Amino acid sequence: MLCRLGSSWLRPLPTLQLGARGPSLAPSPTGGAKRSALPLWAVASVPSVSPGGAGSWYEGLATSAPVQGAEEMLLGAHTATGLPWWGSILLTTVALRGSVTLPLAAYQQYILAKVENLQPEIKNIARRLNQEVAVRANQLGWSKRVARLTYLKNMRRLVSELYVRDNCHPFKATVLVWIQLPMWISMSVALRNFSTGTTHAEAGFSVQEQLTTGGVLWFPDLTALDSTWILPISLGVINLLIVEIFALQKIGLSRFHTYIIYFVRAVSLLMIPIAATVPSSIVLYWLCSSFMGLSQNLLLRSPRFRQLCRIPLTKGDSDTPYKDLFAAFYAKFISRK
């Protein structure tokens, strides 16, 4: 055991060595362009972009390649389908979530399942390594600090080797966030450009005119705020449902994860007043995106879908996930005394 410790598991610790923003001019409507239904403060809060390209960070974001790509995508979907703008926004959102984020979410679950299945092996390695470090510390007279550092350094190395062996480094599970967040921001800024008439697409103010009559039901004007707050409140409710579903499927959450859940709950509630101050076109996109996220989370619980995506079985998998979820939800929120 000690020979193994010295040759393959433990490695000596390395020696520590101490040692001008320009003014932005808002374009004025030409011809018979209809004035935006947004209040003046809302339009003024989004600076238009100067021809020279110099300006604030938002100006750079509003004319960036991802935002222009989102604008072209929305215009292309609207032109190709002939749907009203509310339908084009919904269709584009569903297409993006289904073709981009759903495969990435399935890949995320694949990585997390493999990491979870490694936990028994990691615990076994940690137990044996702890014993061998204790023996070596007694032999060489290491202090507790040196023994602890040696254990942590070698444990990190051994765990990394396991991740490489099974090709499941946890960082790969974050790919979804690095793709979904920029896409969400780009679509939101593109819709705001359309709603405020600051877009740099060829359509210009014609898109803003179309949005003023491109809504449906209680929000016929997609450039205006939702005075009924139905869209913002619905957005908050769906986001909270996503958070609670995540919390219910985790048993024995650490203190860190508990803090994260409380933080995300707070953000979900904060999104309600924020959504009430932006054009309805953006809130409609946010609502549809969140609804697709909720549907995606529920779909990824299906044993058949997980098997189709070749997601490995884990100890915590259930044959009746939806029944278990409803029971947990009922016990936590309805039958709670």
Image: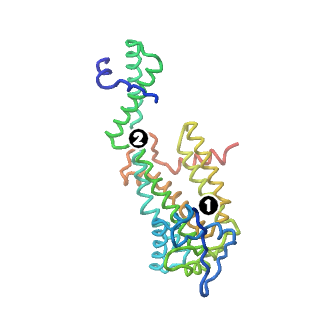
Q: Which residue is mark 1?
A: 235
Q: Position of residue 112 (x, y in %)?
A: 42, 44
Q: Quadrant of the C terminus?
A: top right
- For image coordinates 65% across by 69% down, the residue present is 44
Q: Nearer the viewer, residue 52 or 298?
A: 52
Q: Residues within 10 Å of mark 1 (few under 14, many from 20)?
A: many
Q: Position of residue 300 (x, y in %)?
A: 46, 53
Q: Quadrant of the N terminus?
A: top left
Q: Which residue is mark 2?
A: 115
Going by the numbered disc 2, the residue's amino acid type is Val
Q: Are marks 1 and 2 in contact (CB under 8 Å)?
A: no
Please tell me the numbered disc located at residue 97.
Answer: none
**Left or right of 21, for residue 158:** left
Q: How many marks?
A: 2
Q: Position of residue 58 (x, y in %)?
A: 56, 63
Distance in Å between CA atoms under marks 1 and 2: 32 Å
Q: Residues within 10 Å of mark 2 (few under 14, many from 20)?
A: some
In the image, residue 263 above or below residue 282: above
Q: Position of residue 287 (x, y in %)?
A: 58, 63
Q: Nearer the viewer, residue 79 or 300?
A: 79
- For image coordinates 36% across by 39% down, the residue present is 163
* Among the 4 quarters of the image, the one containing residue 248: top right
Going by the numbered disc 1, the residue's amino acid type is Leu
In the image, residue 265 above or below residue 155: below
Q: Nearer the viewer, residue 313 or 240?
A: 240
Sequence order check: which comes first, mark 1 or mark 2? 2
